[in-house]
Image (cartoon, helix red, strand yellow):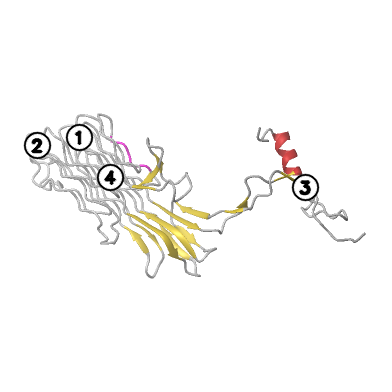
Amino acid sequence: MSNRNFLVSGFNKTGQNNLDNQGGLVGPDNDPVINDLVTTFNSPGTFNRTATTCKLLVVAGGGGAATKSGGGGAGGVRYFASHPLPASSVPVSVGSGGAGDGPFPYTNSSGGGSTFGSATPIAATGGGRGGNRPYPPGQNTNPRGPGEPGGSGGGGGRGFQNTPTPNNGPGSGNAGGYNPPEGNPGGTGNPDPSAGGGGGGGYSQAGVGGEDIGSQGGDGLEVTNLFPSDIGKLEDDGGYWVGGGGGGTGPNPQVGGKGGGGKTGNNPGVDGVDGTGGGAGTQYSNPGGAGGDGIVVVSEAGAGPSSSSGMWTLKAQYTAIIDGNWPS
């Protein structure tokens, strides 16, 4: 009889273990799945490549909301389905969300920018702050009424105490001038003191103009099928989103845009969600919220660990049964 080797449950005919003493296989011999290698940055850092190309998402920080006025714009969103990676290490910066507003003086601010790379970085612009209502007479001559430009623009301000807003325009979006655009403008504020401020712009939608009941922020980018489920905010539609604008103030609660945009209401404005670049929501009687921090995600195709859905070694099966993890 020849001494030709062949696989029988992980051992060859001569008794040599071909599976590193794992005890053989259980289940169908499926082809292994080569997973993507996903690297997420929630703060500044350095990226070193494993592959030569990647899917790349760069999201800047969202804008802060104004007290009783305009919602914050979402941070700019830049997505690339295939982006070349340099052989050298890559610096990464992640923008913080803009500050929320107190009563007086107004201090809300736009979000910070995010970048990937050094010489010619992929950059996203921070979301614009929401526009403010006028100061009470004699307190300040700077109305800060318009929303600030940004990746997505802040919503325009509303009037206050019988004083119409002198300039209630929204902040413009796509401040970086990119193609495709990184965001949209905010909504125009209503100059009527009894009405509402504009909603902040989102990646895929402009903010809604100031209405008597409040104004919704624009929706962002759905990333459900682009990256793992821990990227972005899980919204009511079951999808994960980034880059939503914050709601503008009004007597009734208004939701922020899908993608971490803060909502409004009679409580303090809701902050944008960190890791989404969501713009902050404002409110009707309390300070406005802060913008959500940005994020940078690098996904290298086929550079992650391999897996197989149906193949178990006997050793792994035994361990899973003892630990109570063996599938029924």
x and y, in percent, of residue 95 in the image:
36, 53
Residue 33 covered by magenta stretch: no
**Residue contact at pointers 3 and 4, CB within 8 angstroms:** no
Mark 1 or mark 4, whichever is nearer to me? 1
Taking 159 as reference, is 223 left or right?
A: right
Can you tell which mark lies on residue 192?
Answer: 2
Mark 1 or mark 2, whichever is nearer to me? 1
**Residue contact at pointers 3 and 1, CB within 8 angstroms:** no
x and y, in percent, of residue 33 in the image:
59, 52
Residue type at numbered disc 2: Asp
Can you tell which mark lies on residue 24?
Answer: 3
**Residue contact at pointers 2 and 4, CB within 8 angstroms:** no
Q: Residue at x 37, y 37 (%)?
A: 237
> Which residue lies under the disc numbered 1?
214
- Report, in whole angstroms, how far the alpha carbon at label 1 lies from the one at label 4: 17 Å
- Rate crowding at label 4 as few (under 14), some (14 to 19) or many (20 or more) other CA atoms within 10 Å: many
Can you tell which mark lies on residue 190?
Answer: none
Can you tell which mark lies on residue 64?
Answer: 4
First to last magenta residue range: 269-273
- Rate crowding at label 2 as few (under 14), some (14 to 19) or many (20 or more) other CA atoms within 10 Å: many
> Could you tell me which secondary element the residue under label 2 belongs to?
loop
The one nearer the camera, 67 or 127, is 127
- Report, in whole angstroms, how far the alpha carbon at label 3 lies from the one at label 2: 76 Å
